[in-house]
Image (cartoon, rainbow, N blue to C red):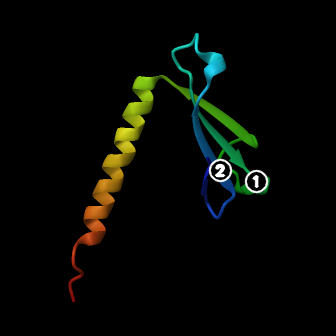
Amino acid sequence: MFLYLLDDSLSVNVYYESSDNQFSDNICIHFWESCPEEEKVFLGDETHLYLTPHQARQLAGLLLAAADASDKNHQAPLEN
């Protein structure tokens, strides 16, 4: 399952790479871009970032903490 960002020009997929099970960093974050070169975030059309399970959990925790902080900030009543 992909997550589409930046007006659907950047897709992100996260998965366990079973063929790399001999390596500790076998969780892959796969980025794929479908935009003009001058708009790209990464140098290539595809980028793979491999994480260990511990790093993946740390990243997940950081994302959840940022989402929680954002939710709290946006739930505050607006002052007139």
Residue occupying image coordinates x 61% and y 60% = 6
Point out residue 10 in the picture as x, y percentages from the top left corner.
Answer: 66, 53
Residue occupying image coordinates x 35% and y 47% = 64
Residue occupied by mark 1: 34
Residue occupying image coordinates x 58% and y 10% = 22
Compare marks 2 and 1 and give the one earlier in the sequence: 2
Image-quadrant location for residue 36? bottom right
Label for residue 11? 2
Q: Is residue 63 left or right of residue 13?
A: left
Residue occupying image coordinates x 43% and y 27% = 55
Image-quadrant location for residue 79? bottom left
Label 2 crowd (10 A; few <14 / some 14-19 / many >=20)? some
Image quarter where the C terminus lies is bottom left
Q: Nearer the viewer, residue 61 or 45?
A: 61
Tags 2 and 1 touching, CB below 8 Å = yes
Residue 55 lies, with reference to residue 6, above or below; the image says: above
Q: Amino acid at mark 2?
A: Ser
Q: Is residue 25 left or right of residue 53?
A: right
Residue 36 lies, with reference to residue 47, above or below; the image says: below
Q: Secondary structure at mark 1?
A: loop
